[in-house]
Amino acid sequence: MPQRRSHVAPSAAQTELAAALATLRESLDAPVEFPASVLAEAEAATAPVPELDLRDIPFATLDPLGARDLDQAFHLERHGSGYTVRYAIADVPSFITPGGAVDTEARRRGQTLYAADGRIPLHPPVLSEDRISLLPEADRPALVWTFELDSAGVVTDFRLERALIRSRVQLDYVSTQQSLDRGEEGPASLLPEIGALRLEQERLRGGASLNLPDDEVVRNPDGRYAIERRHPLPVEEWNAQLSLMTGMAAASLMLEAGVGILRTMPEPDEKSFESFRRQTEALGRPWTTGTYGEYLRALDRNDPMTLPVLEAAAMLFRGAGYLPFDGTSPTDAEQAAIAAPYAHATAPLRRLVDRWVLTICLAVSNGKDVPDWARESLDELPALMQASGQRASQLNNATINCVEAALLTPLVGSVIEATVIELREDRATIQIADPVVTASAPVPAGAAPGDAISLRLVRADIARGEVEFALPKDGPGDLPR
């Protein structure tokens, strides 16, 4: 499904928006600048050169266009009737001193935050965008996972090693998808094949992928903001399967060793399943057979009713958290959407917990003791990640709200067409197609998800990130509160 970009807001609204976004960042407990002690330690940080040299293997990275914090590089090749997949992860643990200034600051931040007017990185850029990043044509230490897959995409063996690598090329999603669609040979030529096999393995496990479109705030070259609704490209889904495969391998290593931290999510209860079934029936796309994962995979992405169904399915993907353990492996270890134990292990430049997972997995793989610093701080991680997750969610939601208000400012007083996405008593979540805006609004009596309705835009407050709608028949004294 193609991406859709909204109109940009007029210049006066953009000025007000820029001030609102700056205020938003200041209101968060998320400092942009790093303390001098952190920067000094980062400048001096080095890592020992790995004994294993894999620079002859032509690794490649695949990320959004222009990214500099490159966590992963891959190399794919046929091996007999199956495949060998090498997945190299930036060696963050080797550069950061436990208990040092960089480590302490990273624990405070938890993850990289993405704002409309810039990123708030987890680590100083000298590390995350330079010395540790798997940039092309640069020698880098990395933690390399090597997977052997059979002809069905099943992992038959894997290992983790620290090695010196050299990525050959930095690919981006859009141009790589275009190249694959043209049938061109390249580093990602086997990705559709392997990705499809891994997706089939997900289906056989009973896993499910939601793949909701993302509302992304983009900044145009002239400095003005817009909202872009992006549906994941197939190449992004195939690439994600490499990361999921790695996360499952990391979980299996830690469970076998009896120490680590998992990313978990409970199976939806019957009440949630029944509620979702009723919603699919109301939307005219009833879920009647198979697992919910199979149902979601079968949805037609070009069907206008698919988005309301996916929004309704979001209730099934709740309750994710982190589960540390040491000494006894947990019995409730599964991530329900993946349908397997899973750990975050592939984004250490951007997410704090991955450094612990990689440290533990490398020690286990080499038959060594897990470092004391990692074991002793495991129990701190869930709270640190929860706090950073809340900041990320708050920043993302508030940013989109402010930009949406700016986009709608010139339409105040106008009647706008919208689609009902989800009903909640006498109000609904609505989707406006142009400009791309999702909002809460009153709905006419009898409206149902998927219905097209008309609304009058009453107010757009950029600073507060608020918009207000009324039904066209309502007078000034009847506006909803």
Image (cartoon, rainbow, N blue to C red):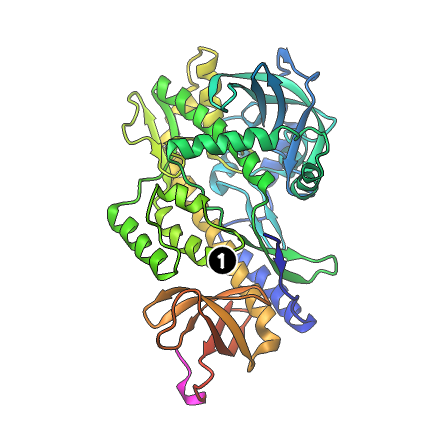
How many numbered badges does the structure rendering display?
A: 1
User: Is residue 346 visible to the viewer in this orientation of the structure?
Assistant: no
Percent across and percent down for residue 476 are 45, 88
Q: In screen coordinates, is 323 left or right of 394?
A: left
Report which quarter residue 191 is drawn in. Answer: top right
Q: Nearer the viewer, residue 55 or 95?
A: 55
Determine crowd level at label 1: few under 14, some 14-19, many 20+ residues with C-alpha closer than 10 A: few
Question: As displayed, is residue 463 above or below residue 150?
Answer: below
Question: As displayed, is residue 122 above or below residue 468?
Answer: above
Report which quarter residue 427 is drawn in. Answer: bottom left
User: Is residue 418 visible to the viewer in this orientation of the structure?
Assistant: yes
Q: Name the residue located 39 percent from the left edge and 39 percent from the top edge.
A: 337
The residue stretch that appears in magenta: 476-481
- Secondary structure, mark 1, is helix
Percent across and percent down for residue 253 are 41, 20
Residue with the mark numbered 1: 397
- Classify the position of the C terminus by image quarter: bottom left
Q: In screen coordinates, is 124 left or right of 453?
A: right
Percent across and percent down for residue 254 are 39, 22
Q: Does the magenta stretch include residue 479?
A: yes
Q: Name the residue located 43 percent from the left edge and 86 percent from the top edge.
A: 474
Percent across and percent down for residue 310 are 43, 53
Q: In screen coordinates, is 85 left or right of 184?
A: left
Question: As displayed, is residue 127 above or below residue 150?
Answer: below
Report which quarter residue 216 is drawn in. Answer: bottom right
What is the three-letter code of the residue carrying label 1? Asn
Q: Nearer the viewer, residue 248 or 113?
A: 248
Q: Which of 130 and 11 is in front in this view?
A: 11
Q: Which of 85 and 100 is in front in this view?
A: 85
Question: As displayed, is residue 444 above or below residue 155?
Answer: below
Q: Does the magenta stretch include residue 353?
A: no
Q: In screen coordinates, is 266 left or right of 443?
A: left
